[in-house]
Amino acid sequence: MPLNILFAARPERWVTYETPLRQALDAAGIAAHLSTDIAPQDVDYIVYAPNSPLQDFTPYTRAKAVLNLWAGVENITNNETLKIPLARMVDPGLTKGMVEWVTGHVMRYHLGLDTDIRKTDSDWTPRTPPLAQERQVTILGLGALGAAVAETLVYLGFNVTGWSRSPKDIAGVTCLHGDAGRADALHRAEIAVLLLPNTPDTENTLNAETLTQMPAGACIINPGRGALIDDDALLAALDSGQIAHATLDVFRVEPLPADHPYWAHPKVTVTPHIAAETRATTAAQAIVENIRRGEADEDFLHLVDRAKGY
């Protein structure tokens, strides 16, 4: 008997994901009825986006798991009607996209490209950029994305420090944890990359106090979550010169309002939430792998810890 798989996301997502999901199910040999309209009591798995109209999971009495289409789960972890396992999206395509985006901006800061690229002959001042081994980069957040970014930067020769809530061990990375570890990690951060989840514990990770713990003239890259930064504190640190520049891809309100100070600030680069996006083909394969595991009584991959919020 085929499995009933409900796709619970906005219509444009169905257009993008229907074919890749069907192809991945066929490739895995899983017979399934995949649809956006299945009676709740008949659903076996829910492929889900948190902005879906589906917010009450109570009627889904047969469902075995909710398989999130997004890496972020902060908008669903507190849903009290959700009693079954929730798996976040860890998509190889998304990970590669994030690694490439972060690496590009780290190299931009490291090499001083904004300073060195000339459009006129009015200022011809040659300089020798440092080597990667002379640059300290700190990654705040060592989950799947943070670890992948850290490993790539180590491969390029950077001195990489990583900070996480719990202890981690990544080859070539100085891994720190806890409050004292965070202060040490920030102290080293000539370039800081924020890849933490959005939880009550991580909100305003960079604030008036922690920004002063960074080296004067440090640079910040935030492709993680907008709430990780106290915006007023960052603007003040940019104005004082404590922070030389910030590249921000995520914001508390998106799209970033037209009157937000970030738009006009000469030391801020705004990008429109493009650092990483789930790729339908690879994401579909990740979802189907969890369905296969559920049917084989194997552990689901990337389960969310509701207490931690990620």
Image (cartoon, rainbow, N blue to C red):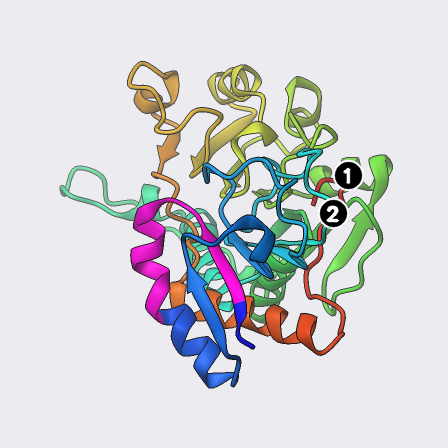
Give the Cα distance between marks 2 and 1. Answer: 6 Å
Q: Report the front residue among 1 and 264.
A: 1
Q: Quadrant of the N terminus?
A: bottom right
Residue 128 in view = no
Q: Amino acid at mark 2?
A: Trp
Residue found 45% across the figure and 33% down from its top: 245
- Left of 289 or right of it: where is 201? right
- Neighbourhood count class around disc 1 (C-alpha, 10 Å): few under 14, some 14–19, many 20 upward: many
Q: Is residue 12 magenta?
A: yes
Q: Which residue is mark 1?
A: 182
Q: Report the front residue among 216 and 301.
A: 301
| Residue 189, quarter of the rendered image | top right
Residue 101 in view = yes
Q: Classify mark 1: helix, strand or loop.
A: helix
- Left of 93 or right of it: where is 81? right
* Disc number placed over residue 163 in the picture, else none: 2
Q: Quadrant of the C terminus?
A: top right
Q: Which region of the structure is painted magenta? A: 4-19
Looking at the picture, how far across and down is residue 250, in whole percent? Answer: 46, 36
Marks 2 and 1 close (CB-CB < 8 Å): yes
Q: Classify mark 2: helix, strand or loop.
A: strand
The image shows residue 19, relative to residue 269, as above or below, that is: below
Residue found 46% across the figure and 84% down from its top: 27
- Neighbourhood count class around disc 2 (C-alpha, 10 Å): few under 14, some 14–19, many 20 upward: many
Looking at the picture, how far across and down is residue 253, in whole percent? Answer: 43, 24
Looking at the picture, how far across and down is residue 184, in whole percent? Answer: 78, 40
Residue found 44% across the figure and 82% down from its top: 26
- Left of 250 or right of it: where is 260? left
Q: Is residue 273 magenta?
A: no
Q: Amino acid at mark 1?
A: Arg
| Residue 153, quarter of the rendered image | bottom right
Looking at the picture, how far across and down is residue 268, in whole percent? Answer: 39, 29
